[in-house]
Every structure is written in C-alpha cells, then in structure tokens.
Amino acid sequence: MLRSIESETFAADHVCHSNFQGSALKMEAVGATRIFQRSIVKRGLKYAHYYGDGDSKGFISGKDTYGKDSVTKNECIGHVQNRVGVRLRKLKSKNKNLSGKGKLTDSFIDRLQNYYGIAVRSNVGNLSGLQKNIIATLFRCSSNVEKPMHRLCPIGKDSWCYYQRALSCGKKPKEKYKGLSNEVLNMIKPTYLELCTKELLTKCLHCKTQNSNECLNGVIWQRVPKEVFVCLKTLKSGALDAVIQFKDGYKGCVEFF
C-alpha cells in the first residue's frame, strides 16, 4: 500500500487524507511503530512479543518502543520451516555434485522440510527435544537398507518414524527410501545444522504461525489493492467484506446482505 488512512470517525463529511507517503516496505515499519507507540494510551498495555519472519522491518522499528529491546521477537514457524528448502536448494545450485539421482533431489528436500515442521510442532516448549528431533530427521531421511540411521528418532507406536513404529510392534522394519551416501550427507549437514541452533529454535518454541494473518491479508488485498489510494469508506467496506468471507465464505455474505 502506497498510502494508508487513519481516522477515529466515519462521518459523512469526512475528508480523506494521506498519513503516509512512500513504499509498501517502508509503510510496514512506520505502521508497526505507530501501533506500538499508541498501545499504552489507547489500549493500556505494552506489547511484549512480535511474531514475524526473519527480516521483519516492523520489529526492528518497534523493538525499543518501551525501552531498549523491550519487545522480543518470535519467529513464525512457517517461515523457519521454509528456510530448510531455501537453504538446501541454494546449496544445491552452488554445488553440482549434489544434483542427480540418489542425491539432493527436490523430493528429498521437501521431505526433510516437512519433517522439520513436524518436529517443531511436536515439541512445544521443549528445546532439547526439539533440537534432538530436528537432527534426527536429517539422519532418518538419509537412512537406507545398508545404513539404518533411526537411533535418534522417537520410539513407540506413536512415533512419526515408520522404522521405530515397526520395531515397537515387533515387526521387521523396511526402509522406504534409498537414502544418501555419506559423502552427500556430510555436504548437507553443516547447512542443515545452522537451522538447529538454540538461538533460532528458542524463538520457535511457541509453535505459532503468521499463516492466518497472511491469508486474511490476501483476501483484503483482493478488494482493496495495496498499490492504490482509496477513501476511508472503501477501505472499511473492503476490510469488513473480507472478514465476513474469510470467516464464512460467500455464505456469510449472503446471510449478511
């Protein structure tokens, strides 16, 4: 959005005015700062946590609102999970020895990213368990018949690891995938372990995501595009219509009208 509107009233004689000039990226930081600054006066509270992606400009501009580093940043687990795919694909593009059958294929990266997300969601508030599970996913996905590597996976019938589930039922486990060679695994390991640091995972223990907010934003932008200036009435009507449809779909619109 190139310009945004702010008003406390919605009167017929209201005259729309712009309270921001600049790019959409800059508006994120300015908007977040304003929200933090007026929280005490208007809400009687201080925001303690900020959920965002890795390079959130909104957090950087507002983290010192109530004092130095008074607002802490928590990572959206969806963004952190996606970093697995981004980092490994970047590594693959730089090293041609990782490409080809039985190596770092796209399906292997997707599987590794999926299990990373499962590990995060299964260890809310448990840093040591989370770190252990994430490392286990790398070895679990790299395992093969000649070289089973499921020792770190959770044991029991409810384990997300098919190998450990089979063992708990007294069955002989069968490897589903061909896995990776030690050479390829050792090339991947440093990049993957960068996403297992305590500093990063501590910010993911809440297991919360921005997805619901991002989805609602998309519905609003279909009605009120970010790139154009609109009057207050259009902005409010578009936002309200988006909330109705986001919650109940077109059925909600029919009932409302």
Image (cartoon, rainbow, N blue to C red):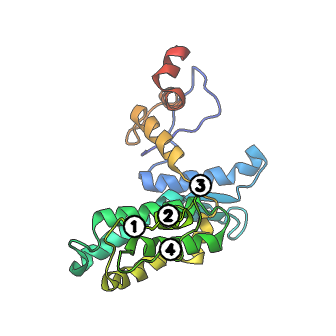
Q: Tags 4 and 2 in contact by the CB under 8 Å rule?
A: no
Q: Tags 4 and 1 in contact by the CB under 8 Å rule?
A: no
- Which label sits on residue 166? 2
Q: Residue tagged by mark 3?
A: 208
Q: Tags 1 and 2 in contact by the CB under 8 Å rule?
A: yes
**Relative to 101, is 149 on the left or the right?**
right
User: Where the N terminus falls, by quadrant?
Assistant: top left
Find the distance from the CA under tag 4 to the CA under tag 2.
17 Å
Find the distance from the CA under tag 4 to the CA under tag 1.
18 Å
**Relative to 98, is 145 on the left or the right?**
right
Q: Give the mark nearest the N terminus, 4 or 2.
A: 4
Front-most of residues 55 and 85: 85
SS at circle 1? loop
Kind of residue indicated by mark 2 = Ala
Kind of residue indicated by mark 1 = Lys
Q: Residue tagged by mark 4?
A: 136
Q: Position of residue 93 (x, y in %)?
A: 25, 73
